[in-house]
Image (spheres, rainbow, N blue to C red):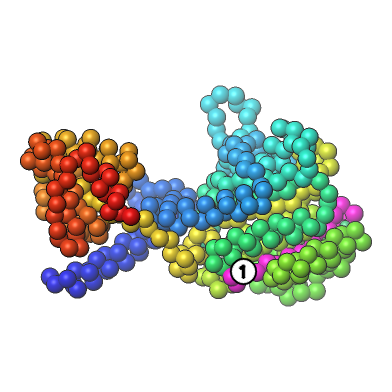
């Protein structure tokens, strides 16, 4: 096979491998296994990060952490296991998350425990704020977290049952729209740094305790006479969570939704003022947004500002990559004093997928520059300490000690595209030296082992 064909074949293999990975990642294909040769798949909908994705992911996560540091958000990692009641009280009994999507744990010990894998991060952070007495700190407290969340959703493209969220929360202090704008500013900073310049926010205000009940009444009145014309889910929503009527995606409900009462018409003067300030700050910061009258965000703890961020040009355009809002009653509902709060979460998997899909800023792989080749058993054994010493001196060395054939090792060095190969055989063991070969020029030299670190460092400059 000539060189061109080999490289074409390599490309092809890569593509096939990618496709296989993609297919398998659609979430644990449940196959009927043969009885005597059972194989296992990951649990359906659990997103697993494979090695080739980590380069992207680490870079993205490092950027998010950098932004958090820059805006002075202190990191917090709460437990992955929480009491179910925390979410029942804060997220709300009538929500999909609480009704259908929580993973309950069976613990071996105390049978009275009702534990769940956390479905989202905000309630946990609010719980920690109370538990650790953060209200005694200068307010507001700005917190950042990055970790897995679990929801028993129907797995489909872009939705996972285990997902990683980076969250930013501002708790305590004044109930000021400037903080609403600040969290959006942070979200857009992340979008920009990720190269997603066309990201846009959809925003809305869902009012407060004073004005929400009025709107709820209006909505119920409006929909009550039309129950036959709305989908089943909406009939359920009308009873349990009327605001969710506004974000129904079912086609049969769209016509009716058009004339439904909207939040913005019924806001009290304080909420109106808050929303007006929020829009002014967004304009000042030049953050791109659209007001979406139907945005409700579904969770009970939200009040006033809610928002979601979309990347329109991506394949997953209809899925929000980030979402959040204000939650001024959250701390109260879980036993604290009235405390203002606003924040948002970013779905790491979705965003990293979009970045890869767009092939934005492909991460630079650290180049492998040195490959270590051993020849013979004596050299193989001694190689262990030689390589370790190089690594301790900060020199990254590739090797394939499991392969004894010189040819196979050379081939690997070739594939890695290294600049230098170190060759170590029986003769070198006795002379305490190593042969260094420049792969570009083919020139070989022998260097004493005790000088090899300095020599390599000099050459790598
Ligand atoms: Zn209000
Ligand atoms: Zn509907």
Q: Position of residue 117 (x, y in %)?
A: 58, 40
Q: Residue at x 19, y 52 (%)?
A: 421
Residue 26 appears anywhere in the view: no
Left-right relation of 299 to 459: right
Q: Nearer the viewer, residue 282 or 209?
A: 282
User: Number of marks in the image?
Assistant: 1
Q: Residue furthest top?
A: 109
| Residue 213, magenta (yes or no) | yes
Q: Quadrant of residue 8?
A: bottom left
Q: Residue at x 25, y 57 (%)?
A: 418
174 versus 1 height, above or below: above
Left-right relation of 328 to 154: right
SS at badge 1: loop
Disc 1: residue Cβ within 8 A of ligand 2's nearest atom: no
Q: Residue furthest right?
A: 269
Which residue lies under the disc numbered 1? 199
* Label 1 environment density (alpha carbons within 10 Å; few <14, some 14–19, many ≥20): many
Q: Nearer the viewer, residue 60 or 319?
A: 60
Q: Position of residue 295 (x, y in %)?
A: 72, 64
Left-right relation of 178 to 119: right
Q: Residue at x 13, y 55 (%)?
A: 444
Q: Position of residue 102 (x, y in %)?
A: 60, 45
- Give the quarter of the figure containing the C terminus: bottom left
Q: Position of residue 146 (x, y in %)?
A: 57, 47
- Give the quarter of the figure containing the N terminus: bottom left
Q: Quadrant of residue 263?
A: bottom right
Q: Residue at x 50, y 60 (%)?
A: 352
| Residue 451, magenta (yes or no) | no
281 versus 100 height, above or below: below
Instruction: Point out the stretch of residues depicted in magenta.
Output: 197-215
């Amino acid at each position: 096979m000539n060189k061109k064909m080999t490289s074409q074949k390599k490309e092809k293999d890569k593509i096939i491998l990618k496709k296989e990975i993609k297919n398998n990642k659609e979430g644990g294909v449940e196959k009927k296994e043969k009885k005597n040769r059972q194989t296992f798949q990951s649990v359906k909908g659990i997103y697993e990060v494979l090695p080739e994705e980590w380069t992207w992911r680490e870079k993205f996560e490092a950027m998010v952490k950098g932004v958090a540091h820059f805006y002075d958000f202190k990191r917090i990692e709460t437990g992955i296991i929480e009491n179910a009641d925390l979410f029942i009280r804060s997220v709300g009994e009538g929500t999909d998350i609480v009704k259908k999507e929580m993973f309950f744990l069976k613990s071996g010990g105390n049978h009275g425990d009702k534990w769940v894998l956390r479905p989202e991060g905000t309630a946990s952070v609010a719980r920690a704020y109370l538990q650790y007495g953060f209200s005694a700190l200068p307010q507001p407290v700005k917190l950042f977290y990055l970790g897995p969340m679990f929801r028993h959703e129907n797995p489909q493209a872009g939705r996972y049952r285990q997902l990683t969220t980076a969250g930013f929360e501002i708790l305590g202090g004044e109930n000021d729209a400037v903080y609403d704008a600040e969290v959006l500013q942070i979200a857009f900073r992340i979008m920009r740094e990720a190269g997603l310049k066309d990201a846009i926010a959809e925003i809305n205000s869902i009012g407060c305790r004073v004005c929400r009940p009025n709107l709820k009444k209006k909505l119920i009145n409006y929909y009550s006479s039309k129950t036959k014309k709305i989908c089943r889910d909406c009939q359920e929503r009308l009873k349990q969570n009327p605001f969710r009527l506004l974000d129904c995606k079912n086609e049969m409900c769209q016509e009716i939704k058009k004339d439904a009462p909207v939040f913005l018409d019924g806001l009290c003067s304080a909420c109106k003022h808050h929303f007006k300030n929020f829009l002014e700050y967004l304009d000042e910061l030049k953050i791109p947004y659209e007001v979406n009258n139907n945005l409700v965000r579904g969770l009970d703890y939200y009040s006033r500002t809610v928002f979601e961020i979309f990347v329109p040009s991506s394949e997953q355009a209809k899925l929000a990559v980030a979402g959040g809002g204000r939650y001024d009653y959250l701390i109260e509902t879980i036993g604290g004093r009235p405390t203002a709060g606003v924040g948002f979460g970013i779905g790491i998997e979705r965003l990293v997928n979009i970045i890869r899909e767009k092939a934005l800023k492909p991460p630079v792989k650290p180049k492998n520059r040195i490959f270590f080749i051993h020849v013979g058993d004596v050299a193989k054994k001694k190689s262990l300490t030689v390589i370790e010493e190089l690594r301790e001196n900060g020199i990254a060395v590739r090797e394939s000690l499991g392969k004894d054939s010189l040819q196979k090792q050379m081939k690997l060095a070739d594939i890695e595209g290294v600049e230098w190969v170190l060759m170590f055989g029986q003769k070198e063991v006795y002379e305490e030296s190593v042969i260094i070969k420049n792969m570009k020029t083919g020139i070989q030299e022998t260097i004493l082992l005790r000088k090899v670190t300095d020599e390599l460092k000099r050459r790598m400059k």
